Image: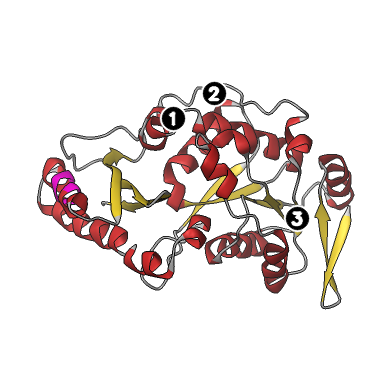
Amino acid sequence: MFALNFNNTAMHIFYGKVALIAYLKTIKTANSTIGFVPTMGALHQGHLALMQRSLKENDDTVVSIFVNPTQFNNPEDLEKYPRTLEEDVKKMRGLSDKMILYAPTVDDIYEGHTISEDFDFDGLENQMEGKFRPGHFNGVGTIVKRLFEIVTPTNAYFGEKDFQQLQIVKKMVEKNHLPVNVVGCPIFREDNQLAMSSRNERLSPEERKEASIIYRVLTEAKEIFEKGTPEETIQFVENSFKDNERFELEYFVIADESTLLPIEHKSNDKNYRAFIAVFVNSIRLIDTISLN
């Protein structure tokens, strides 16, 4: 265990699971609760909001910062993913010096075998992100399961920007009978309504400004969906990006929230959600919006 000190306040920081597990045993009681916020670092206000909620709802809060190699199907994306641990610690400390940070190495997590487990998420993994990022959700399931086993949290907090990931984590918890309550939290957005993401740091100021088109198209698509058909809505979104030189639409899908299966017709007794992935140069941005 190491304690990094900023302005005379210390935060417990662990780089190895053995020391973290030993420490957590000293603070746990029969009735205490542990909140957990897993992240890949490059923290932004959305992450801090998850931490704030955990601090409010639990006796102790653990945050992990780990860029997980097994969920990247693009080696360049993994290499360029921002790693800003010192800045991240400052941001956490600005929120509270009572949190516990777990910032493991790859070897500490994978013990020399950096491979994913194979999961069956009842088909949730085959849609949207799973279709375009082969093996991605096996990597997500592997790291989240291992982190849950190490931290043994009462409540774990995830942002709804990665809504498919949220549903998959819930399914993994259900199928593996893990005693964790998975909590979905609202998307935090920048002033121009771009969904907050660590990848936004790789955008130029001009790209970041113009990326407001993603949420603007989503909100217009929601209005069209309310009055029209799924097909008309999809056509509108595809046309919105068709002649845009800066942004390339990878996918736009309208799906049933529970199954994540694409829909062809609307039904009054179901909840629907729109999912989008857009490239700005080589930087991939995702977003989602409820259509109900």
Circles 1 and 3: CB atoms closer than 8 Å: no
Circles 2 and 3: CB atoms closer than 8 Å: no
Q: Quadrant of residue 252?
A: top left
Tell me where the magenta segment starts and ends, as one range: 234-238
Give the amino acid type for the residue marked by disc 2 in the picture. Answer: Phe
Give the amino acid type for the residue marked by disc 1 in the picture. Answer: Glu
Give the amino acid type for the residue marked by disc 3 in the picture. Answer: Leu
Residue under circle 3?
A: 101
Circles 1 and 2: CB atoms closer than 8 Å: yes
Q: Earlier in the sequence, mark 1 or mark 3?
A: 3
Identify which residue is drawn at 81% across, 41% down.
Answer: 17
Q: Quadrant of residue 234?
A: top left
Mark 3 burial class by Cα count in 10 Å: few <14, some 14-19, many 20+: many
Q: Which mark identifies residue 125?
A: 1
Q: Is residue 69 above or below residue 205?
A: above
Q: Secondary structure at mark 1?
A: helix
Q: Main secondary structure of the magenta part?
A: helix
Q: Residue 236 colored magenta?
A: yes
Q: Describe residue 264's horizontal placement relative to residue 129 as left or right.
A: left
Q: Which mark identifies residue 119?
A: 2
Position in image of residue 82 (x %, y %): 59, 55
Mark-to-mark CA distance, 1 and 2: 9 Å
Residue closer to the observer: 248 or 262: 248
Q: How is the image coloured?
A: secondary structure
Q: Describe residue 30's horizontal placement relative to residue 77 as left or right.
A: right
Identify which residue is drawn at 44% across, 30% down.
Answer: 125
Q: Earlier in the sequence, mark 2 or mark 3?
A: 3
Q: Is residue 72 above or below residue 84?
A: above
Q: Is residue 1 above or below residue 17?
A: below
Q: Describe residue 99's horizontal placement relative to residue 117 as left or right.
A: right
Q: Secondary structure at mark 2?
A: loop
